[in-house]
Amino acid sequence: MSAYLEITLKIAESDRQSAAEVYNKYKQPFLDSISGAKSKELLVRDDDVQVLHGFESVEAAQNYLSSTLFTNDVVEALKPYLQGDPEIKIYGVA
């Protein structure tokens, strides 16, 4: 079963370009180094920004959330732009 990890971020419109740069910086390292990673997309809406990650399994999605790349790199780089805690959801796809 494949899976998606959806992270919804509240980011002010004035900070979205900077947040997109963080996305671009870590997209390829995510795809190259995270076990089970299949895709990563940035979705920009009027109210928020979502990052949709594709994985081979729910377990791979869960493991990414505790990876060094996520906790030490991505989260730290995004902190200055966040307006509240991210909303994190994992979906299994049959």
Image (cartoon, rainbow, N blue to C red):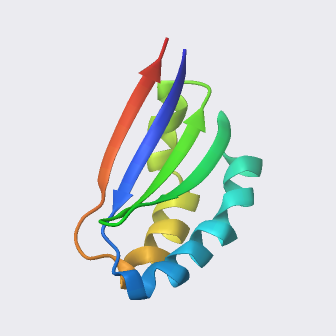
Residue at 55% over, 44% down: 53
Above or below, comparing residue 82 to residue 47 in the picture:
below
Q: Nearer the viewer, residue 64 or 20?
A: 20
Left or right of 70, for residue 82: left
Above or below, comparing residue 43 to residue 1 in the picture:
below
Left or right of 33, for residue 17: left
Quarter where residue 25 is shown: bottom right
Q: Farthest residue to the top: give it.
A: 94
* Place of residue 18 in the rendered image (x, y in percent of width and height, measured from the top left): 53, 83
Residue at 22% over, 71% down: 84
Q: Nearer the viewer, residue 34 or 39?
A: 39
Left or right of 89, for residue 62: right
The N terminus sits in image quarter: top right
Question: Can residue 31 be seen at all in this image of the molecule?
Answer: yes
Question: Can residue 35 be seen at all in this image of the molecule?
Answer: no
Q: Farthest residue to the bottom: give it.
A: 14
Q: Farthest residue to the left: give it.
A: 84
Above or below, comparing residue 14 to residue 73 in the picture:
below
Left or right of 77, for residue 27: right
* Place of residue 21 in the rendered image (x, y in percent of width and height, measured from the top left): 61, 77
Q: How many marks?
A: 0
* Place of residue 68 in the rendered image (x, y in percent of width and height, measured from the top left): 55, 59
Residue at 65% over, 39% down: 37
Quarter where residue 90 is shown: top left
Residue at 49% over, 39% down: 63
